[in-house]
Amino acid sequence: MAPLIALIAGTALARLAGLAGIAALDGWIAALRVGLAVMFALTAVAHFAGRRRAGLIAMVPPRLPRPDLLVTVTGVLELVGAVGLLLPATARVAAAGLGLLMLAMFPANVSAARRQLTLGGRPVTPLGQRTAMQVVFVAAATGISFGA
């Protein structure tokens, strides 16, 4: 739920800043870029630290090799994508890449829900709720990729 809150709050605050006169944030797509960047910065941190990292490693489907490396690589990609969203010249490509990354990582969420794993000491988000949030996240990335 924290990623969804980060997306909504980041977008809303950026939009308010745009309405207050910050030209670079004047518009919903610009605000959405900030919100999605905040969300990915938040989720990326979990790939590198403590119990959250251990939980993410456990989420990787057992048939995939080197789950620790996969978690590190996806964390780096999320950070690079978050920065890319903030740069107008790379925002559309970054959003498209992050959208594809989310689709590629979704099977780990399905696997974790089916195996009833915990993430940072809490049960993973139930699959139905996670799927709905994933649709919102991918829609945000798609909106940025194809938005004006």
Image: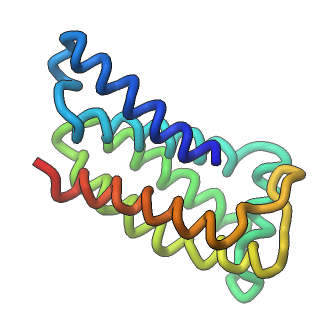
Please state the horizontal and vertical placement of residue 129, each as a whole percent of the image: 62, 64
For this rendering, which residue is in front, 132 or 23?
A: 132
Above or below residue 140? Residue 126 is below
For this rendering, which residue is in front, 141 or 76?
A: 141
For this rendering, which residue is in front, 36 or 126?
A: 126
Please state the horizontal and vertical placement of residue 94, each as a whole percent of the image: 31, 53
Above or below residue 93? Residue 30 is above
Please state the horizontal and vertical placement of residue 33, each as a whole percent of the image: 31, 40
Residue found at x 80% / y 56%? 119
For this rendering, which residue is in front, 113 or 52?
A: 113
Q: How many marks?
A: 0
Above or below residue 138? Residue 24 is above
- Colour scheme employed for the rendering of this structure: rainbow
Q: Residue furthest left?
A: 148
Q: Residue furthest right?
A: 121
Residue 67 sits in quarter: bottom right
Residue 87 sits in quarter: top left
Residue found at x 49% / y 74%? 104
Residue found at x 75% / y 74%? 113
Q: Residue furthest top?
A: 20
Residue 79 falls left or right of residue 81: right
Q: Residue furthest bottom?
A: 63
Above or below residue 113? Residue 89 is above
Residue found at x 52% / y 65%? 132
